[in-house]
Amino acid sequence: MSEALVASRTAGTDVFVPAASGGLQFWRRLRTQRAALGAAVVVALLVLVALAAPLLTAIEGQDPTSYHPALIDSARGGVPTGPLGGIGPDHWLGIEPQTGRDLFARLAYGARVSLGVALAATVVQIAFGVVLGIAAGLGNRWVDELLSRITDIFVAMPLMIMSLALLAIVPPAFPRPVLVTLVIGLISWGNIAKVVRARTLTLKELDHVAAARLSGWGAWRIARRELVPGLAAPVLTYAALLVPQNVTVEAALSFLGVGVKPPTPSWGQMLTAADVWYQAAPQYLLLPAGALFVTVLALTVLGDGVRTALDPRAASRLRVGTGRRRETKADTGSRGDSV
Amino acid sequence: MSPIEIPAEGQVENPVGGSAESPAESPAESPVGSLVEVDGLTVGFGPLRAVDGLSFRLRRGAALALVGESGSGKSTVAAALLGLHRGTGAAVGGSVRVAGTDVQQASDDELRRLRGGKAAMVFQDPLSSLDPYYAIGDQIAEVHRVHARASRRAARARAVEVLERVGIADAARRSRSRPHEFSGGMRQRALIAMALACAPDLLIADEPTTALDVTVQAQILDLLHSLREETGMGLLLVTHDVGVAAESVDDVLVMRHGRAVEHGPVADVLGTPSQAYTRELLAAVPRVEARRVVAHAADRGRASNRPDHPSDRGREGVPSDHAPNGGREGVPSDHASDGGREGAFGASGEVVLEAAGLRREFGRGKRAVTAVDDVSLTLRRGETLGIVGESGSGKTTLGRMLVGLLAPTAGEIRYAGRPHTGVDPAVQMVFQDPVSSLNPRRSVGESVADPLRARGEKDEQYVQGRVRELLERVGLEGAHYNRYPHEFSGGQRQRVGIARALAADPRVIVCDEPVSALDVTTQAQVVALLGELQRELGLALVFVAHDLAVVRQVSDRVAVMRRGRIVEAGPADEVYGSPRDPYTRQLLAAVPALDPEAAARRRAARREPVHM
Amino acid sequence: MTGFGGFLARRAIGTLLTLFALSVIVYVVFYATPGDVAQITCGPRCSPAQVHQVAAQLRLDDPLYVRYGHFLQGLLAGQDYSTGTSVEHCPAPCLGLSYQSDQQVTRLILAKLPVSLSLVFGAMVLWLVLGVGTGVLSAWRRGRLSERVLTALTLAGTATPVFVIGLILLIVVCGELRLLPFPQYVNLTDDPEQWAWNLLLPWVSLALIEAAAFARLTRSSMLETLAEDHIRTFRAYGVGERSVIGRHALRGAFAPVIALNANNFGSAVGGAVLTETLFGLPGVGQELVHAVNVVDLPVVVGMVLVIGFFVVLANAVADVLYAVADRRVVLS
């Protein structure tokens, strides 16, 4: 932000020295990691599918909620009549047993719920964690003590159990995806608050913060200019960890029947009944399970990549000073070659 | 990656053992009896060549110092002697023989026998160089068992023995302590004990005293000296500190950019250097014996004419001394400077900063620690007050209170006669760490512009112009405005820090160890810059440092701190020339001398016990 | 040592405070919700008369803090309940009565606890052994093919939710291959062998995802330790790689592993709920899901408190273990 400001202000003057901004450096480091790049592509595709779900299902000519009783064999307990669980030009991935709803449509709309809830919950977690973490880090002893205690309680609170219980008592009229988002976000912000508090404590002891105080700036400006930019890296790193975790929690809650409720499709919810049908319509089990697996995997790998890019030391640790010996000759022979 | 399997590590306890007298190794010994033979050593890390064609010899029992500034490749050489680059991706060329082992060609087993058994290394940072989770005695015993066929019990006994030898009192009990329970000096002794455990032929000491206080440094250097006399082992000392080298070795090899600049007996190299770089290096080393050279007469008129402080507050009405007892003990005030040299503006200069009875505690209740205890001082326009002390003396805490970054627990600070709390643009600070003192995410120009913008300067043209002017004034370029801190060297960043302090138009600058992180030649430049600015702007400086020589170089008056109190204060020449407090004397006696003969005399003097 | 004693005392007080605060939060969240608390508490199938009785029992006319005090009193000293016809005494840790089954919540939970404890602690042994072992192995084989395979497996493990792996195991092992019967809980005291066999699949499902987390952590803390200066010291003294990794690097991973175990205990308990539901194990988790579905509020609140109690306790124990593993913590 400030970098851009500087650049625009001085672009016309005598010398312009392009400085590598934080974002550019981050991108350069992320780009060198092939796995992370692949994961980023997968995540981008998933997001695209989620965003374009109405369009894609319109192309297919289906929607996620219409029943197709004609396509299921009620005599055999409701299995799809067509081969391969009803896969065909009308139903790209087949249909749901018993109801005949289109699986592709449910999967695509499920991505919306899954990613939407996970991302939104992460935003809530970060908002709470960052505000409370900074407050604890900058506040006096009593503020810090109080906020840290509260944080400890929320860290100790088992997310699944609390969400399970909370979701039970909220009236059904409340929109479920929003509810799930809020419940996840409001319960599990503790760890990020701890990270932010620790980082704030470190940052505020740094000399450049002291220098800013000596310059005469007020607390608010110092927090904004000297502290917050330094928090970006740890917060982003932690957020990258939270997203896949939230995907899993949402799926788990929906799997238990307390998360997103029918008719809104969700991957976790699709799995609830799937084990009964795995012989007749294996894709009914495999598709949501695979979607979950791929999503969480891609988000995790991307998160690892983000962490490595933000903390290059973590990456170089893996290379330097290992003492794992190579053959002697390889060392003596080559001069000045870069390894 | 090599497909070759690592040999089982369990076979490490080799029958040859660690002892140097092993006959099996004798045939390989070089005919001249050199302990270390380095020929055309080259170490490259990627495109960077850290060591470039270095050759030297070290006789058995002799001592050689590798001296150089950061980036000279001296530590890389030390690591190469033990083959520590193997497997790290560094490209090592040339040949290295240590105690008869060809380090380049040696098998992994041979190399392990060399490491610790024949050549042992002592590292710079004694805390991080020991495993925090194990007792120190166990760590020494573990190393001993690698090289000697010893039972656990015998190895443990050996550990206690060497710990005793290096001067750890109550060694049997202390050997069960973990590193964090030791003081810095004791840890370094423990590391030396580990080196001794296997009776090596060569001790490689990589900056062994850099992390230590000067009195502890003297003890460690004395210890190394007596161990060498006793065991006859050779010493390769890697250091940036010419004084440390003068104290400890027979020969010196001056390194720069991975090459040897000058090599010879210590007295010759330091006494009559033949190379320009060596002379430059020696000239930059601050000497504790040298008086401060002040060129104030010529600058005085010019400086006082500068309209830097339009709102010049009156000279009168300032009580000159607040010490209850007055005199030299406790208060470096103008009383004390009567007989001595005066600042650029003389004793009559107005008082810009005063502190009376300052006290600062950290923690509460039983855990409370008093960092600064009843310190009073007075600072006049144009003078430099040096505050010198070892780690934990409270000097940094004092400096932070003076600029208002820390609130005193008790006592009062007055700026220009008025009681003051909190920060004030008129009192600025230059920080120790050139890395953390600049925000890495903002351009240096923005950082320097902070004080201008903070006081409400809206005219962007003026702000940028002024910042460029300041950058140029401290020896950088105006065009550096848009660069980021990571593009600068340590010395340059320190200059940026000075420019930022100047931007506030201060009357006082407190410099907290401003040069301790810098190389000696850079150090000299930054010190010179501060002196120039002081004369030009009539600044009052408080110079906080652990280095007695640097403090003498810059200060008109000096206060010596110990455990939160000022133990002695007065004009620099008096304090350094005829110290009254025993602690000051001890400090001065511990400063390494550049003259090897003087160093030997002082070592002898130090052997007489000093009572603290 | 006094330092350590003081540390223990401070930690104990902190734990008690946390437990107290947890009970307040849980009580307020569940008994001060907008809406008809009596109706929610009693459940959807209650008659108006019953709802009225429940409202009286909950003393809904009293201010919140009085009601909480009453609840706390029941928790600490026990309470008497009128069941309409007689008075029932609910002894010390009294979590109230279920309005669905008229059972004391404490008894209900105690009856289910052995199943959940068997599941969680058995799985914990498995995930620690499997996770730390994998982590050590992949740090040890760094840069080799075996490390890559382990890393890939570990990643796959982190990305597979408990209910997915459980579902697949159930279908493949019990359904298709018929290697094991569908799990039926057998008491440890009745038949230890059957107990273990029947819990094998639940253990594996619950442990795999946690083991993956531990493998990643162990590996990275070991590599971090390997990059530290003291490792360089031991290498420079000819100490062999086996000792450097097995003794010094592994020791560095100790404290982080303990910390993670505490941190992940909560999520593992969540996983246990899924596992119990999936495998039909009659544990606390399954009961909780049931209670949530029929909206049996006293049971839900009781379960949340009991599980929270265990998680807070696990955190406290881990803190102490952490301090034992790394004494420097005590000093700061």
Image (spheres, rainbow, N blue to C red):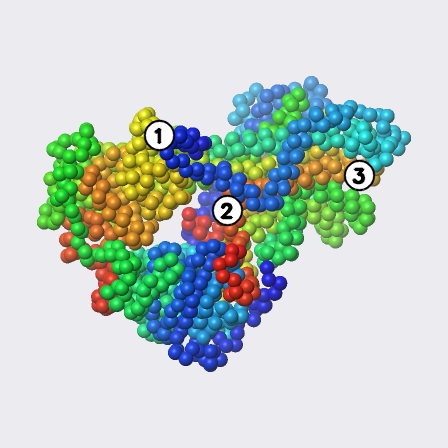
Label annotation for residue C265:
none
Q: Position of residue C69 (x, y in %)?
A: 53, 29
Q: Name the residue nearer the viewer: A135 or A332.
A: A332
User: Is residue B246 visible in the rendered structure shown here?
Assistant: yes
- The quarter in which the N terminus of chain B is drawn is bottom right
How many tags in the picture?
3
Q: Name the residue nearer the viewer: B275 or C299.
A: B275
User: Is residue C295 visible in the rendered structure shown here?
Assistant: no
Query: Mark 3 sits on what residue?
Result: A282
Q: Is residue C6 left or right of residue B502?
A: right
Label annotation for residue A312:
2
Residue lying at 48% horizontally and 50% vertically, measured from the top left: C323
Dot 1: chain letter? A
* Circle 2: residue type: Pro
Residue lying at 59% horizontally and 56% vertically, measured from the top left: C143
Q: Is residue B184 left or right of residue B45?
A: left
